[in-house]
Amino acid sequence: MKILFTTSILEHPAAGGPQLRIENSIKALARLGEVRVVSRLREKLIGGPQATAFYTKLAKSFCFSPSASLSESFVIRNIQKLFYRYLGQDADARFLIRMFDTHKMDVLWFGYGNISWPLIRRIKHLRPDIKVVCDTDSVWSRFLLRELDLERDPARRARIERDGRAKEIEERDWTDLCEVTLAVSEVDAAYYRSIARDPARVRVFSNVIDLATYRDRPEPVAGLKHPSIYLAGTYGHATSPMDRAARWMLDEVLPLVRIQIPDVHFYIVGKNSELTLADAAGPHVTVTGRLPSVLPYLCHVEVVLVPLKFESGTRFKILESGACRKAVVSTTLGAEGIPVTVDQDILLADGPEEFAVAIVQLLRDPDARKRLGDRLHALIKQGYSVEALAEQGRGILSYLKAGQ
């Protein structure tokens, strides 16, 4: 089948989970048929000419939508964003429809469709015959509403409740309007099926990694300290999942670990960490900010942490750790959607004392670290590779073709 793939999240080299999902989705779909990619971000934001060359080689064609031409001027860009938002994103919609017709495509696939709902709705209004796939990275309403368990401020709780319920309405709407809604796991799929008029329209299209890109083990960053624990993600504000996770580690877990292992070093890695967690940096804590690659850290630390208290979807932190054969300590929610087995390929703990005990156990036992890392690698290799994703994609396309 011929797939027109469009996304407003794209970058090469991929700097985080969202970008990895899109890149590996395109890799998998390109194995199944003709894929044409339309970026709704301008070249500078996806990695420059290097990124354009990468996707041009990977897909049948690669181009930019009208909205990708937004001005670099902050004021003008925001005026343009208002134009696209309130006039039905008409320019992008008509551009995609023209491409669909010109190249006689079979399916219009929205990477991160859960943030493209206005554009999807506009296209289906103009051309209800076009088969649309809404590919989601999570259940966004669940992501929002789960924060209620942590938030005490009444005004913020009211905003969370309002935004979460509004997103639930959108989710119901797109599961009915789109030919297929994709979920990253059976956990998320069960939610979408529960709200869909036709549960058969909900399919799983997992988060995966390309194991080939982890084959070469880079040298460690200069001065890497041992023993070390590692937390990677995207940060940005005090109430984000990653910021809350980092603060929980710093305030409640790390002091308990240091009682047993005083010289443990904590690496906090990822975009905006240097802005929101700079105060935590010190002799035993390194805050890196965004990195060109996390692998010089990830491949050489002792233990990887996934201490999330609210989120939705599946964690690339665990997938990448498996690719690098690293031992992981996670909360139960942090490992949601991935069929891990406790004490076999991961350690799970939800309270600060239990989380600290798990970390200390692994820091003191290199054989246990190796055993967990090897078994997690086997799990990821078996079910979370690009090859496995291509098989899921084949089933989705067969379903769409059968519905012609």
Image (tube, rainbow, N blue to C red):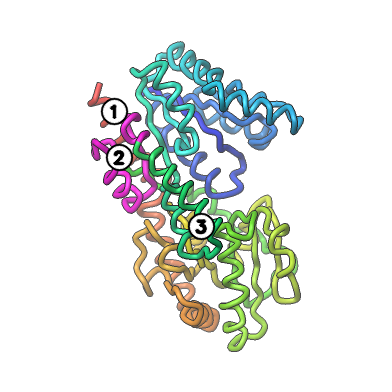
Which residue has dot 2 on it?
A: 202
Asked if marks 2 and 3 touch (Cβ < 8 Å), the reply is no
Is residue 71 or residue 258 the one in the foreground?
A: 71
Nearest to the eye among marks 2 and 3: give it: 3
Q: Earlier in the sequence, mark 3 or mark 1?
A: 3
Can you identify the residue that label 3 sits on? Answer: 157
Please, what is the three-letter code of the amino acid marked with disc 3? Arg
Magenta stretch contains residue 176:
yes
User: Residue at point 27% right, 44% down?
Assistant: 193
Query: Circle 1 sits on which residue?
Result: 400
Dot 2 or dot 3, earlier in sequence? 3
Q: Which mark is drawn over residue 242?
A: none
Q: Among all residues in the image, which is located at the extreme bottom?
A: 259
Front residue (pair 175, 356): 175
Answer yes or no: do the residues labelled 3 and 1 have beta carbons within 8 Å?
no
Q: Is residue 180 left or right of residue 158?
A: left
